Image: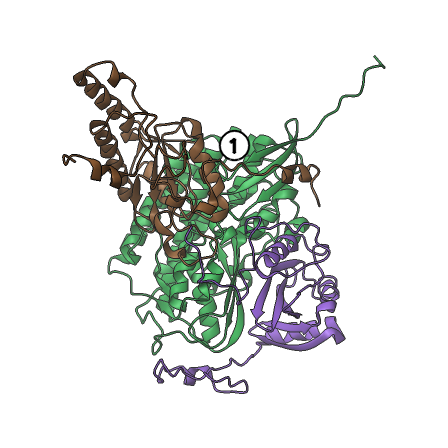
Chain colours: A purple, B green, C brown
Amino acid sequence: MTEQPNDETKPAEADAPAAPAHRGPPIVVAEEKLSERGEETAFMLAQTLGSLVMESAGREDTPWALVDAKDLHAACEKCRDGELNTDMLNVLLAVDWVEKIQVVYVLYSTSNNRKVILRADLPAGSPSVASVTDLWEAAGWFERETHDLFGVAFPGNDDMEPLLLYDGFEGFPGLKSYPLHDYEEW
Amino acid sequence: MSTQPPLETVDMMLNMGPQHPATHGVFRMVLTIDGEKVVDVRPHIGYLHRGSERLAETESYGQVVTLFDRMDYIANLNNELAFVRAGERMMEVEAPERAQYIRVILAELNRVASHLLFIGTYAIDLGAMTPVMYTFRERERIQNLFEHVTGARMMHNYMRIGGVKEDVPDDFVPWVRRLIGEVRTGVEESDRLLSFNEVFLGRTRGVGVIDAAMAVSCGLSGPSLRGSGVAYDVRKDDPYEVYPYLNYKVPVGENGDCWDRYYLRVLECYESLSMIEQCLDQMREGPIMVTGRRIARPPAGQVYVQSENPRGDIGVYLVSDGTDKPYRVKVRPPSFCNLVGLRPMMRDAYIADAVAILGSLDIVLGEVDR
Amino acid sequence: MAVEGESREQALPLFVPQAWDREKGGRFFHTSEEGDESLGKGNRPALNRVPGAVPGVITAKLDDLLAMGRSNSLWTLTFGLACCAIEMISAHMAHHDFDRFGIVTWPSPRQSDVMIVAGTVVKKMADPIRLLYEQMPDPKWVIAMGTCATSGGPYYKSYSVVMGVDHIVPVDIYVPGCPPRPEALMDGFMKLQSKIKSDARNRQVDDLSAPVVSPKAEKDTDDGTA
């Protein structure tokens, strides 16, 4: 399968399963289009974060912004206290792209009904990003879970006991490098 | 006498272990108690962590639906709906109208079934052993319909990305109309028995209060959040499927105590039943599956889609790399986030209240641990 | 946010019963390796000391009577782990009533006869399951309900799931299904009842000091009447 990152084909055309399975169809990349409301939210996000944003786009009505790992706490604080007023941390997750680990924060504002996504790239060897438990209570458990499954360290969070896995579990099962099929039968 | 040494007290730690009749599954909480008052609570989860998210990366999109069935095992169809909506958003398709109506009818029926189970088990937690028999009788009726339509009582595996698996049987509409009447009588029965009962009120009024700001910061959602007065419902704020065409109210509480959270769910049952009636009136003939797709192979990208589960707002973050298996599936389980609110709620609670508070959050461990 | 007394909680390890050794792979149907005394009894009903003293006819009737009593009043430990628990609860409720068979759920392991392991067994939960099993007094039986408890089920490839509860406790009845219908669980109970009665009838006088061998080896040394 070859990567075609600049492919602008509409997904509907490329979808017919014409190619036989062993060759594999070409990879199609979805184009990120924001709706009207999404454009407004993206504008507010750009204004709030200013120069912290490295990249941004969005799909439907949720814009996302890529920030640097060390700016993430400041960016979250700006989103919470500024015009966007995101008072709820909806979810905090990590995605393992083998060379890097990307943490994704989805923030939601109950007063404006607007949703934004903040992303940060962390190096795969020792991923670490400042904890946001002082901003939202919900972050505590999400960070514990991400630490369990991906090994991301969150300095600032005092309570990093394993949440989902048992004490003494070796390895980080969320990572792609974890041998999933190498199970023991007990 | 002044020569006596001062009394030394130590807070006791009481373990409500993974096996406990009132913890709704394998959930462990360690209460630090001072006499009869709870000083602190530390929940321990992970006793049902099955690795669904990681397993989903090795399965095709159709197979992931079965994993979602088993996550929140009481509201199966709502979970399936959450996932197939994410898949559809990724593929940039929309299910046909008839499929959407069928989905909403089944999802709302499942919401009623889930709330019925909540009412029954909440009552039995507090010591009332009769309502659970009544509510399970109503659940059997609903599960009978599910078996007729989808083939299974519990793990339906009925919804697909792009529609539903097969059309409903011919006697679906009259059956559901009859069912709505029967279930409404059943909900009224349990409602009359419990909701304004003096003992029930005494056990749940003013217990486990959480204010709106703390609730939002903890990430609560669903009836647990609406009990504190925050009117956040994904069906109203970010409408999906055919919800914009339905006429319904979302009940919102005032005090943020256990009774509010319980009564909201009872009211939601009635609203859901009226929503189902409207769907039956509006439903028309038509296709039930998007044409031309057999293997879901979405374009590479990431989506985050939220739906309203009976327990709260379930979010599915789907990352695709263009192949027929997802690259990363992350579920934002409502019960996981609701459990974060357990600590603030347990302030100034007695041991007996601990059970009432945990019950009012309506958690499902399959979803918390995935 | 640290709780006072937190370190005290950490210092006390969860009790791991001596008889179960995780490194050995934890199998119980192949019993009695190197003097594991408590391991060997499997799920035999409690032994009856009368046979040595009184001739066969009276003890056989007593065994049957005890078996009939035990099988018609099985108290189950409320031990629902996952989705199968919902079907188990449905089975106890009004539509598929279990109470008419004498089966009631009892929250305490010390007073229950049957442990229905309903749901996926996760490695973190393995220690509590063994502890609960050890807390149940003899005679006790275990029903593995659902495919997750039988063999890992749909989570067979997962990193944190035990592939079947029979790696932890000896199982008498396996009820397949995902989840099994309440009628299927009822069928499992019928089979357990007939097992209890037939165990009583085919009992051999056990010498407590003799090592217990696995059923396969026993059959080989039999004189052909089995």
Where residue B304 sits in the image (x, y, percent)? Answer: 54, 67
How many numbered tags mark residues here?
1
Outermost right residue: B2
Numbered disc 1: secondary structure: helix
Q: Crowdedness of circle 1 by 10 Å Cα count: few (<14), some, many (20+)?
A: some
The residue indicated by pointer 1 is B200
Where residue B234 sits in the image (x, y, percent)? Answer: 53, 60
Which quarter of the image is occupied by the N terminus of chain B? top right
Of all chains, the one bearing label 1 is B
The amino acid beneath tag 1 is Phe
Q: What's the residue at 70%, 69% (across, down)? A: A69
Where residue B76 sits in the image (x, y, percent)? Answer: 41, 54
Q: Quadrant of residue C193?
A: top left
Q: With C77 as the anchor, is A132 left or right in this view? A: right
Where residue B316 sits in the image (x, y, percent)? Answer: 51, 63
Q: Establish if A170 lies above or below A71.
A: above
Q: What's the residue at 31%, 50% (across, down)? A: C177
Viewer-side residue, B196 vs C101? C101
Outermost left residue: C225
Q: Is residue C90 shown to the viewer in this render?
A: no
Viewer-side residue, B363 vs B32? B32
Q: With B301 as the anchor, is A104 left or right in this view? A: right
